[in-house]
Amino acid sequence: MRAFTVPAAAVIGLLAAPAAADTTVIHAESVIADAESEPTGRATVTVTDGRIVSIEDGWQDVPEGATMIHLEGKTIMPGMIDLHTHLTGDPGGDFWKEATEPDDWGVVVGAKNARLTALAGFTTVREAGSAQHTAFSLRRGTEEGLIPGPRIIAAGPALAIVGGHGDVSGFRPEINEILDSGYTCTGAVECAEKVRLASQNGADTIKITATGGVLSQQGRGLEAHFTFDEMKSIADTADSLGLKVMAHAHGARGIEMAAKAGIDTIEHGTYIDEAAAEAMVENGTVLVPTLIAFQGISERLGKGIYTPVVEEKVRAVAETAQVFMGKARDWGVTIAFGTDAGVFDHGRNAQELSLMMQQGMSAREALAAATTGAAQVLDMSNEIGRIAPGYSADIIAFEGNPLTDITVLEDVDFVMVRGRVIE
């Protein structure tokens, strides 16, 4: 990351400031207020108690007692939103580590990755599956300013079928039993119970593994795991609690079933076909394609990282991963930004934007997917995704214009989350 200019007195003020500073004034060379806007000229953004108060043309005077941040030569825009991360994990194929590492270690790993994710320009993330309390602890840590990182919308443990993707497998039966998350379910009634259990224990959203997966230790295909009645029960119960449901799903029939059951987002969506896309459009289901995840796992092929069964699945999915999002877009499916960071190195999240453009998106569409579109998925359109009065002060700065060169977002210079400067 390149340096930005902050006067010495301002640095002292930032370090000594409480969790939400009184007033911070940002001078920027240009502002992209949202994905629909063009870059402005020089502007002044005023932040008070973590919220944007005003955006004015030119570099305005700094009120007495305010902290000044001078970003000469830099463009600012809303912080990006990643709808699919795994902060508490790092990439690798050593599935057996689940039997040797305590859940607490996930908080340590997560603190490292929360910082990297924020520094990469992502000021809000949806944590798509973790141990029972690790992501919830991180959520509190970043909210209270104890850990540098993004706002975290956390699912906690994913709901899975017994022996399916998301359940523990690959060990002796007695070890599988010990490591069981407690969130597998069979039948509509038990699945409803597990949604309520997740809500009771602090989930902001419900994650399910609706189909088989690439990185799980079974070669049983990637089609539907839950029955329709089970998925409908999960969706209805979550809705009654005011929670949305995100579904890991690869196979077309699993995608179609999830959409018809009322699931809100499809994660991955690799083998989507026209019938599945039609169901998604009819039900308002959003696709979160996680393209860089497929690239990240392919980079580890042939290196002894994955077990043979996983290697075979990674190779089988590689070609389809190059085209499926473009097909979904052509069929009218709404697409929002997510990466699956954790199956590849955290901090590379913005590379997803270029991959989305390679499958047909314009730079403006990709930018919207990572800001206003993702905010809409989270029902936070009035809170994040824009630089506007009343919005959370989630702001990033960089050189250049992402509407003409999206790769400038891979090199972010300055990050503010909830009015707090990250480093």
Image: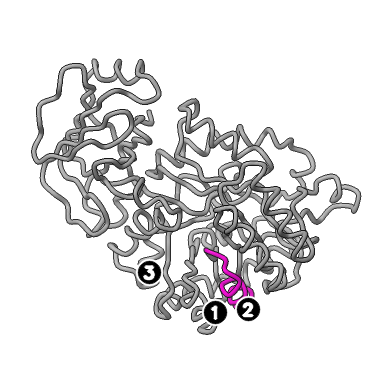
Residue 360 highlighted magenta (yes or no): no
Q: Does 29 appear above or below 253?
A: above
Q: Residue at x 13, y 49 (%)?
A: 40
Amino acid carrying mark 2 in the image: Arg
The N terminus is located in which quarter?
Answer: top left
Q: Earlier in the sequence, mark 1 or mark 2?
A: 2
Residue 221, located in which quarter of the rendered image? bottom right
- Work out how far the residue at label 1 is from the one at label 2, CA to CA, in angstroms: 7 Å
Residue 31 screen position, x and y as percent = 19, 46
Q: Is residue 100 found left or right of 346 in the rendered image?
A: right
Asked if the residues shown at circle 1 and circle 2 are in contact, with their CB atoms under 8 angstroms apart, the answer is: yes
The magenta stretch is 250-264
Q: Is residue 216 found left or right of 318 in the rendered image?
A: right
Q: Does 48 appear above or below 233?
A: above
Asked if the residues shown at circle 3 and circle 2 are in contact, with their CB atoms under 8 angstroms apart, the answer is: no
> Element at badge 2?
helix
Q: Which residue is mark 3?
A: 358
Residue 180 screen position, x and y as percent = 80, 49
Residue 358 screen position, x and y as percent = 37, 69
Q: Which residue is mark 1?
A: 276
Q: Nearer the viewer, residue 215 or 246?
A: 246
* Farthest-out residue, bottom: 275
